[in-house]
Amino acid sequence: MREVFTEVAREFFADVEKVCQELAEEEIERVISLISSANAVFVAAIGHSNMIAQVLTMKLNHLGKRAYQVFDIINPPFGAKDLLIVVSQSGETDTLVTLVRKAKALGGMVLALTSRPSSTIGTLSDGVLKISVKHDGVDFHRLGKIGDVRHGNLSGALFGMALYVIVYALVSILMEHWGESAESFDARHANLQ
């Protein structure tokens, strides 16, 4: 049974590697620019994507950027110089579409992390990072047991894994851009728990 773990890791890695190879340089630069110029960053996602969105929020705080989860009850108000990062594979999640429209009405910027740049969220956003999944040429022998290319469970799992890798890549890029060190990053890590 141990080989199952290796097979799953290989399949995830093969798809994530293709996702990263497809990222457009200008999209990455736009993401860095939007995050860097924001007074504060608010992150919104629902379901599986929200688990990774919470990691993004935490790591932005470790970088010294004020970052909040939209659905927390202790958030400050969203302002005109703030950025809303919306994570939605489909780009059509009703609650998130509503949040995007509200952020735009408040004069803020919106960044979408989605598989569908032409979606409602994608078209309303000031920047989009396309995270495509289920690449041709990747044999999902093991992961295919949770669904093939027609099923949401497989695409959701692949989107989540790609998103996790992308979050850490963005953190690494931002650390360099902002002159952060491992020491300054660690100094902002939670220490009460």
Image: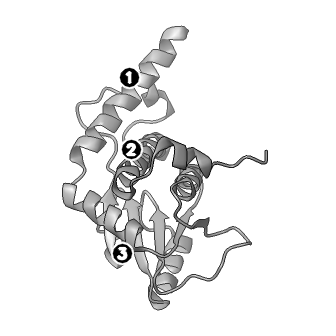
- Image mark for residue 125: 3
> In front: mark 1 or mark 2?
1
Three-letter amino acid code at the position of disc 2: Arg
Picture layout, residue 133 above or below residue 102? above
Report, in whole angstroms, how far the alpha carbon at label 1 lies from the one at label 2: 21 Å
Pointers 2 and 3 in contact (C-beta within 8 Å): no
> Residue 118: x, y in percent?
29, 68
Question: Which sits earlier in the primary sequence, circle 1 or circle 2?
Answer: 1
> Residue 137: x, y in percent?
23, 31
Three-letter amino acid code at the position of disc 1: Arg
Q: Which residue is mark 1?
A: 10
Side of 146 relative to 141 (left or right): right
> In front: mark 2 or mark 3?
3
Three-letter amino acid code at the position of disc 3: Ser
Residue at 74% over, 72% down: 73
> Residue 164: x, y in percent?
47, 44
Residue situated in front as seen by the camera: 10 or 179:
179
Residue at 37% over, 29% down: 13
Residue 141 visible in the current orientation:
no
Question: Which sits earlier in the primary sequence, circle 2 or circle 3?
Answer: 3
Q: Which residue is mark 2?
A: 150
